[in-house]
Amino acid sequence: MATDNKDSISYANLSPQLNKVPACTRTIHLMGIAGTAMASLAGMLKQKGFSVSGSDQNIYPPMSHFLNQISIPVLRGYKPENLHPAPDLVVVGNVITKLNPEAIELARLGIPYVSLPQALHFFAMKGKKSIVIAGTHGKTTTCAIVSWILEQGGLDPSFMIGGIPLNFGNNFKLGRGPYFVIEGDEYDTAFFDKGPKFLHYSPWVTVLTSIEFDHADIYRDLDHVRQSFQKLIHLIPPDGLLIANHDDPIVMAEVKFARCPVITYSLESDGDWKASDITVQEDFTFLRARNRDGGTVEIKTPLYGRHNVSNLLSTLPLSGFLGIEAKNLLKGLETFQGVKRRQEIKGEAEGILVLDDFAHHPTAVRETIQAVKEKYRHRRLVAAFEPRSNSSRRNVFQEQYASSFDGADLIMIPEPPMKDTIPVEERFSSAGLVEDLNRKGLKALYFPDTTLLLEEILRQSRAGDVVLFMSNGSFDNLPSNFLKRLEDS
């Protein structure tokens, strides 16, 4: 598990032999433990009998609650003393820079260290066949659906998911079956390994949902993103399978170079599996899917939105490849309850339905708004969006966001948080987006902070509304605070 990344050696004068797991490991410290994936790894390690601790700067629900429930001590802030007494191994999250106080102390003490993907591969994925769910969009939901279908098929899967699937109530599981389902993130691995995480997961089957430019803080342009996915595709062995979204032209351009069989799915184009007759009703979405051999499947699912229908189509060829019976596949799709913070219903009060969603990329914002508007077509849609991700706080998507809110009746956008970390010439402008939306005839409001946004959204909301909050962070707990204020009124 050694790395040949020169930066990891030169910055601290370390031997590459330190970048591995010692055989006698008993105590493990996770730097950046409150991230979804890191918290899941912490739970896995504790379940395997290790003594686990962690540290983080920003700790908020749901991961803060999860870590508390499984009794893993979390130290607030990064301090050299957090590594005293010295653990046997440190797992370094990708939020950690080489100038982090704990990273400097890690180097000084010479404690063995690994990245999150390395730790996952070593402690949890060894001996399993990995099913990697990759793509710019839809990874979390698709990963959760696949895991639930495998569970329904009696395959007792292991998994790690970038959100909490409601069917399991947990975003990781160490099953006894032969498969490990994992969300394949294209974001970088660690400060000492700038390659994407998914290159560590030895994919046997890969689902590729989409390829778009994202993560502007680490990728130069779309071609740079494509290079990472090319490497992933090349890793799939000839006896594996690549399941690809036929509707995405960039995906289809890349899958030509796969060394394994490729099966496609689609909503619009002519994939090997194609959906038709999609009907969204109050509680369920109904659709028909057919394959090239003429076989058809009638599907009933509580998921809604074309992006989610596209995601679930990928499970059809996967189920066939793994030998899952059709009745178990259909039961899994019908009983899938969704994922926290993915069009999640937080509650309803005063006749106002409150939804919480993780959408942050312009495409995800657009698809989420369209899905919610179609589902609740007779209700006014109020959309509050926080530009919080490393990409959305930059102006790289400034113009694209202006086309993402067309289905909303009222739009509220606060000033981006942590804007001082972005160079002035690269910063996203919330006020500028609001001006663009108003010029298009949409009703949009700008707020310098979330406190003022909360007060205004309480003032403007009325019975019958659907209020949709979108952010890849906590959004200062606005969804919960808004609902509570409604309930207390």
Image (cartoon, rainbow, N blue to C red):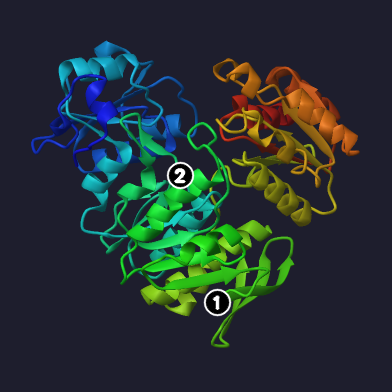
Residue 142 as seen in the image, left or right of residue 419:
left
Q: In the depicted view, which residue is nearer to us: 324 or 94?
A: 94
The quarter of the rendered structure image containing the C terminus is top right
**In front: label 2 or label 1:** 1
Q: Estimate the spatial distance between the alpha carbons at disc 2 and disc 1, rounded to whole Å.
A: 28 Å
- Residue sitting at 83 percent across and 48 percent down? 379
Q: Position of residue 119 (x, y in %)?
A: 26, 41
Q: Amino acid at mark 1?
A: Asp
In the rendered view, would you say 247 is above or below 96? below
- Circle 2 SS class: loop
Q: Position of residue 390 (x, y in %)?
A: 55, 30
Q: Residues within 10 Å of mark 2 (few under 14, many from 20)?
A: many
Q: Which mark is residue 162?
A: 2
* Image quadrant assignment for residue 417: top right
The quarter of the rendered structure image containing the N terminus is top left
Say whether residue 465 is visible.
Answer: no
Q: How many marks?
A: 2
Q: Position of residue 359 (x, y in %)?
A: 62, 42
* Image quadrant assignment for residue 102: top left
In the rendered view, would you say 35 is above or below 153? above
Q: Which mark is residue 485?
A: none
- Residue sitting at 25 percent across and 38 percent down? 46
Report the residue marked by disc 1. 272
Q: Amino acid at mark 2?
A: Gly
